[in-house]
Image (cartoon, rainbow, N blue to C red):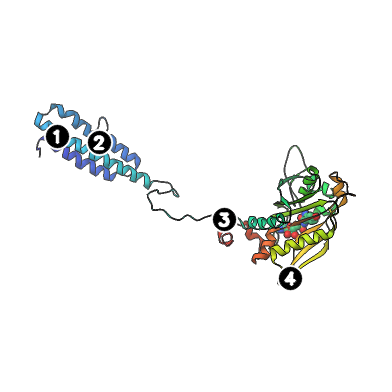
Amino acid sequence: MPTTQSSESVEKLKADATRALRAADSAEQLEAWRVEYLGRKGRLTSVLRALGSLEIKERKAVGAAANRLRTELESLFDERLLQAKSNTAPAGSIDITLPGRKSGSGGLHPSTQMIREITQAFNEMGFQTIEGPEIELERYNFDLLNIPADHPARDQWDTIWVDSDSRSDVLLRTHTSPMQARVMENTDPPIRVVVPGKCYRYESTDATHEWHFNQVEGLAVDEGITFADLKGTLYEFARRIFGPSRKVRFRCDYFPFVEPGVEMSVDWNGEWIEILGAGMVHPKVLKNVGYDSDKYTGFAFGMGPERISMLQNDISDIRHFFRNDLRFLTQF
Ligand code: YSA
């Protein structure tokens, strides 16, 4: 073991360096440490530079000890730097050194599940699924559907209007029925479509009303379509969704775009719950889109998937659907 002044300084250097390295725990402190001990003008580098002035025997011994110390300090430094970085990793970051854990899998929103069930039932009866814009023009939401500006039926669909500098007829659709006009404008009969999508109404909420909710619209237009086709299709739909023993009721209802109009309710523990509005497409609506109303007839309906899911799953409040509470959402 060398006992000269220089070799003692290597040992002292080692003691100082390891003590200082243990005390440094941030990336900044570690960098300062690296400059002091391993940097170009650092203490260990100075020892190595001074080797030339030593006697050959001493030079060999001190040189070997200093190089060993350099390797040792470099690897200790790397270790401490890694530790410091993982200590300061931002909250929520992934520690890749931890053993793997099973990740939770997501699922479809209950409204989406219900919409898919409904559209599939109609797809199997020959209806095609299409979608349309949620930001709509007054013309499609009201005018073409036989709901003129002064018509009291507009009150039923209290409307959220979209601010626009250039026009005053843009709104968030209050129902999916505007898609009836859009489809008929662009397609010749025969038509059989279902249109799921979001609707918005400026109204207060309660257990069965949301200000934003989904609807599924249906439209069939062809030669010779009758009210019996409407009833048969909706009975079959109810059978597929609620089972064969569920009671269904049709009652007269009024919508300006149908004649006659009905509402369909299903029996829920002795109570009738309305799930949709429907009717034979009004001849004025057929004419508005350029159809020959003497040649073609059709039926249409609009239903609320959240209301249907409430019935199916015994949900007491529609507002659960949009609260994003996982305790509710993960039950589906
Ligand atoms: C009627 C005749 C047709 O030929 C075609 C469509 C229609 C339906 C019409 N466009 C309409 O919107 N009627 S409605 O106001 O009674 O709504 C239809 C269904 O949407 C309701 O039966 C209900 O299931 C759902 N709904 C309506 N307002 C809602 C709602 N769901 C949740 N929150 C609300 N605020």
Of the numbered discs 2 and 1, the one sitting upstream in the chain is 2
Calculate the distance from the C-alpha at mark 4 to the C-alpha at mark 3: 32 Å
Foreground: disc 2 or disc 4: 4
| Horizontal side, residue 329 vs residue 253: left or right | left
Q: Which mark lies nearer to you, 2 or 1?
A: 1
Q: In the rendered image, which residue does mark 1 sit on?
A: 62
Q: Which element is circle 3 on?
A: loop
- Name the N-terminal-most of marks 1 and 3: 1
Labelled pair 1, 3 in contact (Cβ < 8 Å): no
Q: Point out the tag, 4 or 3, that comes first from the N-terminus.
A: 3
The quarter of the picture where the N terminus appears is top left
Q: CA distance from mark 1 to mark 4?
A: 97 Å
Which residue position holds label 4?
271
Q: Is residue 266 above or below residue 27?
A: below
Regarding residue 244, the answer to whether it shows in the image is: yes
Q: Which residue is denoted by mark 2 in the rendering?
A: 37
Query: Splitting the image into 4 quarters, where does residue 203 fall?
Result: bottom right
Q: Is disc 4 surrounded by few (<14), some (14 to 19) or many (20+) residues within 10 Å?
A: few
Q: How many other residues sit within 10 Å of disc 2, few (<14), some (14-19) or many (≥20)?
A: many
Left or right position of 109 against 101: right
Q: Amino acid at mark 4?
A: Glu
- Residue 209 in the image, given as x and y percentages of width and height: 71, 59
Q: Residue furthest right?
A: 294
Image quadrant holding the C terminus, namely bottom right
Mark-to-mark CA distance, 1 and 3:
67 Å
**Residue 216 figure quarter:** bottom right
Residue 107 is marked as 3
Kind of residue at disc 1: Val
Point out the frontmost of discs 2 and 3.
3
Query: Mark 2 belongs to which amino acid?
Result: Tyr
